[in-house]
Image (cartoon, rainbow, N blue to C red):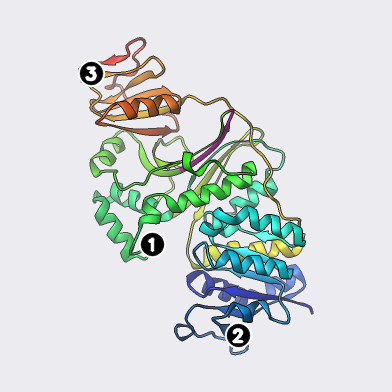
Amino acid sequence: MSTIHIALLGYGTVGKGVYQTIKTHQKRFKAILGKEVKIEAVLVKNLEKHQLPDPDVILTNKFEDIISLPKLDVVIDAIVGKQPGFSYLSQAIKRGCHIITANKQMFAHYGRELLSLAEKHGVSVGFEATVAGGIPVIQTLRKLLSVNHIKKVHGILNGTSNFILTKMREEGCSFSDALSLAQEKGYAEADPTNDVEGFDAFYKAMILSEVVYGKQPDWEKVRKQGISSITLEQIELFSKFGLRFKHVASLEKTTKGIHCSVKPVLVSSSHPLFHVEDVQNAVSIDADIVGNISLQGPGAGMFPTASAIVEDLIQLETERARPDEGADHASFAHEPLLTWVLYGEVKNLEIPESIEIIGKINAKALLVLAKEESIENLSNKIKGITVYQLLGDFTFSGTEESRFPSAHSITGS
């Protein structure tokens, strides 16, 4: 029986998960591929910190030992940072190896270059694990929605921020207390900036943009906002009206180009992301034929990420497909009217004609309908107002004012 020879870069949480999964699923590999899958070598940074369970597998801290292996078919990248991962994978491709990566930061920066290089050398690239862990969103978008035009994509792409918002709402704790709990459980790093300020979700959104549109938006024009400014008071207020805070990455292609944001939004119970709690990730896809598809599952961790990597391995071996540089599955839309909540000192607030007032949730929260440009102009001019997009339908209770047909100045409370 022939063998698929693999080198594994990195032996942290994800690397160990891949190693164990490959070792324990040999019968499945043989049944599906008709081949054995063998890890030939593992690259680590510090040899003293690691010990492999199999003595015949090479453990090295030199990439030269990896790239010069006599037999090497696939290189799996489970390290972090833009470098040296990009350099290592480029060398692997030039040798004629397929590559699979879980490195979202690197792939957001260099994915297009790696895909182009892979096409030139006739090899394939797997990157399912870069977005939403074990959820097969990349394969769904690339393989299963080829005819559909994607209207928009909303995703909860970071489990740490979702866990924090869930705990604040369920347990009535502050942001700092919820963050400390996330760190105790191992969900958040000692420096949680990448998670709570939206960088992690941003990199994943850029990768999704490549898959859906074949390109990325201008990084400087993407609105990126974290969750650290959300207060317990805000969470409790909106919870009374059936709304939940979620940290959401959004993608949509308009006549002005690709629109992307990563920001806290309010979600009603009618939206697919409403029930996504704790460390779960989810992606909601709206397409012209199928309608809405929602994928939910664990977004990180040893075995969810390992699952995405080994499924990529199966795809590479069974399809041997030409690398997909990204096909534009998106339909164009004019800049849409969106629903927004204006929170803060809304009393005596002057509202321009470009913004339609729908109603007042309570004395501190106003519901409006507007294009994002109009909302940005308003928020830039007025202090003391925080703006949140609202996803899903919202129904006013009988005690709340439900319509303001003509007024564009709210007075009283």
- Residue corresponding to mark 1: 187
Which secondary structure lies at badge 3?
A: loop
**Amino acid type, residue under disc 3 in the picture:** Asn
> Crowding at label 2, few (<14), some or many (≥20) Cα neighbours within 10 Å?
some
Quadrant for residue 87, please give it: bottom right
Image side of residue 355 versus residue 115, left or right: left
**Amino acid type, residue under disc 2 in the picture:** Ile
Q: Which mark is residue 60?
A: none
User: Of the residues tagged 1 and 2, which is closer to the observer?
Assistant: 2
| Residue drawn where x is 73% and y is 73% of the image | 30
> Above or below — where is 106 with respect to 381?
below
> Crowding at label 1, few (<14), some or many (≥20) Cα neighbours within 10 Å?
many
User: Would you say residue 395 is visible in this rendering?
Assistant: no
Q: Earlier in the sequence, mark 1 or mark 2?
A: 2
| Distance (Cα) linking label 3 and label 1 | 43 Å
Image side of residue 383 versus residue 151, left or right: left
Q: Which residues are magenta?
A: 249-255
| Residue drawn where x is 52% and y is 61% of the image | 82
User: Would you say residue 329 is visible in this rendering?
Assistant: yes
Which secondary structure lies at badge 1?
A: loop
| Distance (Cα) linking label 1 and label 2 | 31 Å
Residue 359 versus residue 76: which sits nearer the camera? Answer: 76
- Residue corresponding to mark 3: 348
- Residue corresponding to mark 2: 58
Residue 363 versus residue 263: which sits nearer the camera? Answer: 263
**Amino acid type, residue under disc 1 in the picture:** Tyr
